[in-house]
Amino acid sequence: MAPPQVVAGHRPGPTNVVIVSKVPETITKEQLVASTGRAGDVLQASFWPSDLEGPGWAIIAFASPELAKAAKERLDAKALSAAFATAGGPLLEASLGEGLFGNLRGLGGERESPWKEARTPQGHVYYFHSGTRQTTWVKPPPD
C-alpha cells in the first residue's frame, strides 16, 4: 500500500487509529477489542501479545475518528485486568495514531500500482513500470 500523499501546508484530518501499548500477558486480542466499545466499531485490529521481550501492543482501526477518540479515552491509563489494577501492575497506554488511517484502501480490491518512483543520480524524479521497464518523467495515472 502506498503512503498517503502529503500536500504542503495541508494537515491530514483526524485519525481513526488507536495504538495501545503495555498490554499485559493476561490480556488477549479479543478482550482488548471488546474493551474498546461496540463490536461493530472496530474495522481491524493487529495484536502482538506480551512475551519475554516485552509487553504486548495493538493497532486498532475504528469506523470513524470519533470512535477512535472515545476508545482511546476508555483505554488510556486503565488496567483491563482486575488482578493488575489491585496489584498496582502496568496500566495500558493508548494514543491516537496521528497521521495513520486504517483500512481506508484495499476494500475495493485495488492493486498496488506497477509504476514505481525512482531518482536519477542527479536527484531528478522519474517513474518506471516494474513489469515492462518503461520509464517516464510524468507520473502515470493508476492502471
Image (tube, rainbow, N blue to C red):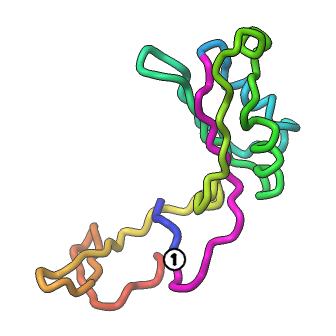
Instruction: Please state which amino acid type lies under the numbered disc 1.
Output: Val
Mark 1, Cα crowd under 10 Å, few <14 / some 14-19 / many 20+, is: few
For residue 115, above or below residue 138: above
> Is residue 19 located in the magenta-colored stretch of the structure?
yes
Q: Nearer the viewer, residue 111 or 61?
A: 61
Residue 45 is situated, as x and y percent measured from the top left of the image, at 65, 38
- Residue at the far front: name it: 88
Q: Residue at x 59, y 28 (%)?
A: 22
Q: Is residue 64 left or right of residue 113?
A: right
Q: Residue at x 83, y 47 (%)?
A: 70
Which span is picked out in magenta?
7-24
Please tell me in which quadrant of the rendered image residue 34 appears: top right
Residue 3 is situated, as x and y percent measured from the top left of the image, at 48, 65
Residue 83 is situated, as x and y percent measured from the top left of the image, at 75, 9
Q: Nearer the viewer, residue 1 or 61?
A: 61
For residue 70, above or below residue 56: below
Residue 50 is situated, as x and y percent measured from the top left of the image, at 53, 20
Q: Is residue 89 left or right of residue 75?
A: left
Residue designated by label 1: 6
Q: Nearer the viewer, residue 38 or 110?
A: 38
Please tell me in which quadrant of the rendered image residue 20 appears: top right
Q: Is residue 118 left or right of residue 46?
A: left
Mark 1 secondary-structure assignment = loop
For residue 101, above or below residue 23: below
Q: Residue at x 70, y 15 (%)?
A: 88
